[in-house]
Amino acid sequence: MIEVLRSGALNTIQDLGRSAMMRWGVGRGGAMDPLALRVGNLLVGNPPGEAGIEVAIFPFQLRFDAACAFAVTGAARASLDGIGLPPNWAAPAEPGQVLTLEPVAQGVFAYVCFGGGVDAPVVLGGRGTDLKSGLGGIDGKPLARGQTLKLRAPPARSAMPTHGIGLSAAALSEARSTTDPPCLRFIPAAEWDEFPDEAAERFVSNPWTVGRQVNRQGYRLEGLELRRAGGRDLLSHGIVPGVIQVPPDGRPIIQMVEANTCGGYPKLGVVIDVDLALLAQRRSGQTVTFRGVGWEEAMAARRGLERQLRGIETALRLMSGRNGSPPRTA
Amino acid sequence: MAKSSLLGLDAMLFDPAGADFDDVMQARIWGLGHELQNLPWVLEAVPGMNNLTVVFDALALRPAEVAEAIEALWRRQEPFTAQGRLVEAPTIYGGDVGEDLAELARRAGISVEEAVRRHADPSYSVAAVGAMPGFVYLSGLHPSLAWPRLGTPRASAPAGAVIIGGAQTGIMPITAPTGWRLIGHSSLRLFDADGDEPALLRPGDRLKFTVQDILA
């Protein structure tokens, strides 16, 4: 069992979200940075989609009541009983040990994964917390101080790493933009052609600043104003995470994982999944740029990310073998 | 003209809509959705308002093939005759939640009672389900009650709020921000995550507001 000692209103149980629930008005949800969650799970020997804790409010602190393997990935500086841990690191914890996550200069979301995964009921195909709708996680709510969490299948002691195990930042960045500011790839959507050339040119040639209104539902961007040239008013239609909407005020909003499943604003495009997490990790005041891509390139990017994750999984299996743990099976 | 466009890597938006919402076209959209839902490469086919979002298996089919398949089905698509249920929504008009009711009547140049009568009279058609869990887009609002959305959405409207946005009316299934106007409160529960079907209403169902009370 795990006891939450310190937390905040945006720290939640998350997995990789729900699929095919749009017909009920339920969105994908899940981790804002799915790659970080998947890597955290791989580090502790879990399947990549096990539920972990998404931390956005720091400091976050928990105590282990039983021995357990854990990993911390994403944007945080972690320490176990006050001893600092390297980034993207998994280690065994003993009963009574306290894990603390502090904020770092770059990034927004960090993830704590546990061997076995966090036990929360499966609601509509997912364990993740949908804060907007109040479903998933534990009673649809953020984690609170004093709350205890169970693990689904605490692994046998022999399966835990006996020492720490980690990944370099380079191992995680291969499939995504490493430029500063990051360049987000998007597939143009229905109304792209209804924006005049100069507006389209402005969108892709200027940096955009992440505004103050950011949450799991959407990120407002600030920069130039984009005006659509005519075009009919749109009736409500399906939207997905990554959609770049342009409301009448001309300032784009990027729909994030907890977005509504229907909307009515004109759409410039859809940021590809691989890059949406890069935006998620940008703070208010930081910038991003955009580049339009075709479906083929977006597909190649997704395949690249999956290949990279398989590489990480293989490497971890070999490393944990060297540590004397039995080889893990997928 | 029918038009398909990519909505990211795995979704296609099929949008044959004209300038105004059309109930007959919506019945064809329901039919198209049902047919597509049975195809192996379709993960989900979700009706919007005179449009359809198709989430497809991007490893099985390429976008051009998806668009072609949707448009071929559409050309011969008949309106779907829904065996819809009629559900009643007991509603208290006005009051704290329905703070815009008096203004709605004033805009229409009618009494509050008449505004309520016009709102509660029709049997609305559930055109689409979406946006929020269990939220329904209803068609059939009396034209005199249409009211453009707020320029700046209000920060929060409570679950159960009966709302009007443009030519549509609905009920808030959760407490959330909305740009729609608030005219009352209904005890009807639109969503139950633990139910066999989590949303109470499906496209093609009908909904009728019943007047429990009118508060000044």
Image (cartoon, helix red, strand yellow):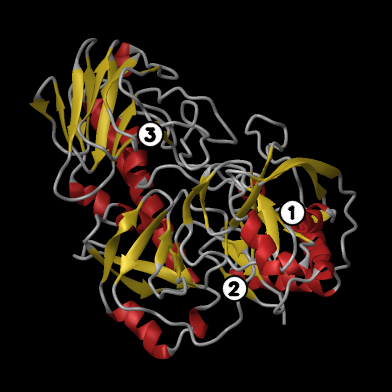
Q: Nearer the viewer, residue B148 or A266?
A: B148
Q: Nearer the viewer, residue B26 or B32?
A: B26
At 57% from the left edge and 66% from the top edge, which residue is drawn? A264
- To which quarter of the image does residue B3 belong? bottom right
Image-based side of B211 in relation to A100, left or right: right
Placement of the N terminus of chain A among the 4 image quadrants: top left
Percent coordinates x, y for residue A21 in the rendering: 61, 45
Q: Are marks 3 and 2 on the same chain?
A: no
Q: Which residue is mark 2?
A: B5
Q: Is residue A134 above or below residue A236?
A: above
Q: Amino acid at mark 2?
A: Ser
Image-based side of B149 in relation to B72, left or right: left
Q: Which residue is mark 1?
A: B37
* Chain letter for the residue marked with disc 1 in the picture: B
Q: Which residue is mark 3?
A: A12
Image-based side of A65 in relation to B77, left or right: left
Percent coordinates x, y for residue A62 in the rendering: 25, 21
- SS class of the residue under badge 2? strand
Q: Residue furthest bottom?
A: A197
At 41% from the left edge and 62% from the top edge, which residue is drawn? A254
Q: Mark 1 or mark 2: which comes first in sequence?
A: 2
**Mark number displayed over residue B127:** none
